[in-house]
Amino acid sequence: MTISSAMRAAAVALAASASLAAGAAQAEPLRLGMTTWVGYGPLFLARDMGFFKEYGVDVELQIIEDASLYMAAVAAGNLEGNASTLDEIMKYRSPEFCFKAVVALDDSHGGDGVLVADGINSLQDIKGKEVGMNEGSVSQFWFNQLLTKEGMTEADVTITNMTADDAAAAFIAGRIPVAVTWEPHLTLVRTQKTGKVLIDSSTTPGAIVDVVDITCDYIEKHPDKVEGFVKGVYKAMDYIKAEPEKAYEVMAKGVGGYLSNPADFAGAAAGVRFYDRARNIEFFGTPEAGEAKDLMALGAKIWGGFGKLKMEIGYADLIEPKWLTVEP
């Protein structure tokens, strides 16, 4: 082989190697963890309709039914991010564990509620009563918002720590008079008339907001992927508005679990408000003013009061607004 031929062969090999490396980089997935929740349906819609891949990002979605477990997976490098409520992720942010919310998905608009036995007609009526609730979860965050509005604290009731599902089951079985839980348990109580829903999150719009947060390391190294991800989410939100029945069918299949039936998914979707591009811009506002800043202040007050925060968290510590205005 001549020197010229050798050089050409080397160039071809180098180009092939570069092509394989680029392909591997392209294929490197953005892995996200989350619980089974109707508000995360748009992520599955964007994945299964090919919207994410259209914008150059491969997204893997993993159902993990415990916030502490999926946050631990992110911290360990087994996931690049997760979908969770804005207040929830505040408890995990620390100087050593950096992640930021890049897009909001929904807020609970009737999907969370307080179940009470007959004869209880106001929050004041639950004073001195046992309340089943998942301590440390968004249920506690939201319940404390309700109590504060009534001039009450958890000291006015007796908290029994249990999951939202177990709280609903205990309530329906008549073992506790009050439970803080979410769908599908609210609908079940309304249908079976085993007690009633005293109040639900439709009365507190914007109080429980789901976001997707991604590690600061991934954001720094793959800004193009993050932009593609946000564009994919926005396209999914637009598709839901244009083709709701088809969207519910795809999302139900993707999310699965108790939401695997499209009719059940559609019913649950009535209890959330999906966040499109315009709503994202409105919600996140600016570091100086906006609903997100106000919600973070509330999170600092409630979770800080329970000693759950690891650092003082400012807007820039938890939110990356760089891609909020991109258009799909």
Image (spheres, rainbow, N blue to C red):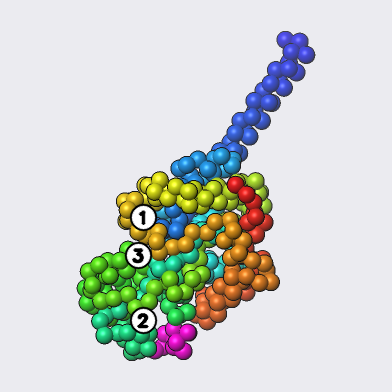
Task: State the residue position of label 1.
Answer: 265
Name the residue rendered at 67%, 67% in the picture. Answer: 286
* Image spot of residue 67 (x, y percent): 45, 63
Q: Quadrant of residue 288?
A: bottom right
| 10 Å crowding of disc 1: few (<14), some (14-19), many (20+) | many
Q: What type is the residue that disc 1 sits on?
A: Phe
Q: Earlier in the sequence, mark 2 or mark 3?
A: 2
Residue, disc 2: 159
Find out whether residue 154 is within the magenta segment.
Answer: yes
Q: Relative to 287, is 113 on the left or the right?
A: left
Type of residue at label 2?
Ile
For the residues bearing labels 1 and 2, Cβ distance under 8 angstroms: no
Regarding mark 2 in the picture, which secondary structure is present there?
strand
Disc sitting over residue 183 in the figure: 3
Asked if the magenta segment contains residue 32, the reply would be no
* In the foreground, 230 or 325: 325
Region of the chain picked out in magenta, as a range: 147-161
Q: Amino acid at mark 3?
A: Glu
Q: Residues within 10 Å of mark 3 (few under 14, many from 20)?
A: many
Identify the element where label 1 is drawn.
helix
Q: Quadrant of residue 93?
A: bottom right
Disc 2 to disc 3: CB gap under 8 Å: no
